[in-house]
Amino acid sequence: MLRKLTILPLLLLSFSLFGQQANEIGLYGGLSVYQGDLVPSPFSAEELNPAFALTYRQFFNPKLALRATALWTELTGSDLPYTGRNVRGVVMKSTVVEATIGMEWHLLGKARLNNTSTFRQKFSPYLGISAGLAFADPKFTEKVELPKKEEDFSTTFFVLPITAGVRFEMTNKLSFSFDFSTRPVFSDYLDGISVNGNPDKDDWFFTSGLTILYTINAENDQFDFD
């Protein structure tokens, strides 16, 4: 699993060669929750878990940016709280590492500096879509024996995070953002079970949290204001 964490540094090295516009790095902290055979609702407070990420963003202009993210979290789920399913009794815990790259649209994005190099605070909502891989390590216990074929599931998943957030720039170099992301994985094996659950419905997981961002080359983010 640790070897997969090297994916983002390689991405960051390649993106550092991009253009001369402002770019930034950030640390993300938040919560995650999974929805699947063991957790039918994404609003299950019992299955909230911490999530952490490292983010790199390369701006092409004040409204359009490329973003690369490496995320770590744990996902949990259990049959035990649900009447009728507690007989099956599956309890799952999985460590997930995800690496993605995508685009963001900052709806109200404007340059940090005006033509006289004066910084102006600004607020903007943004939307993003990314693509990448999630690597899971589901482990579970059960009161009943699962079919042997359940042991053959893949632990690598294509993931398509869709994000909505808000961003506030405090200074020329320091920004904060808060966002919510939904992450389909196009598989029913994120939780490690399918035959004993609902094989016709794929698993998802969701994240929400706060990112603290530091801007590099902020002096290059200078455009005419409207």
Image (spheres, grey):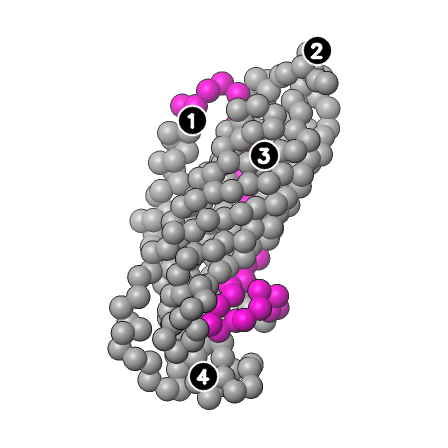
Q: Are marks 4 and 3 in contact (CB under 8 Å)?
A: no
Residue at 61% x, 25% y is: 62
Q: Determine the secondary structure under disc 1.
A: loop
Counting residues from the start of the chain, the first of labels 2 and 1 encountered is 1
Identify the mark nearer the N-term, 4 or 3: 4
Q: What residue did someone put label 3 on?
A: 105
Label 4 crowding class (10 Å Cα cut-off): few <14, some 14-19, many 20+?
Answer: some
Report, in whole angstroms, how far the alpha carbon at label 1 lies from the one at label 3. 20 Å
Residue 25 is at least partly visible in this image? no
Q: Secondary structure at mark 4?
A: loop
Q: CA distance from mark 2 to mark 1?
A: 27 Å
Q: Which residue is mark 2?
A: 116
Give above or below for 151 relative to 14: below
Q: Label 3: how many residues lie within 10 Å, few (<14), some (14-19) or many (20+)? A: some
- Let me know if residue 43 is in the magenta part: yes
- Magenta stretch: give its range: 17-45
Query: Which residue is depicted at the point 40% across and 46% down?
Result: 132
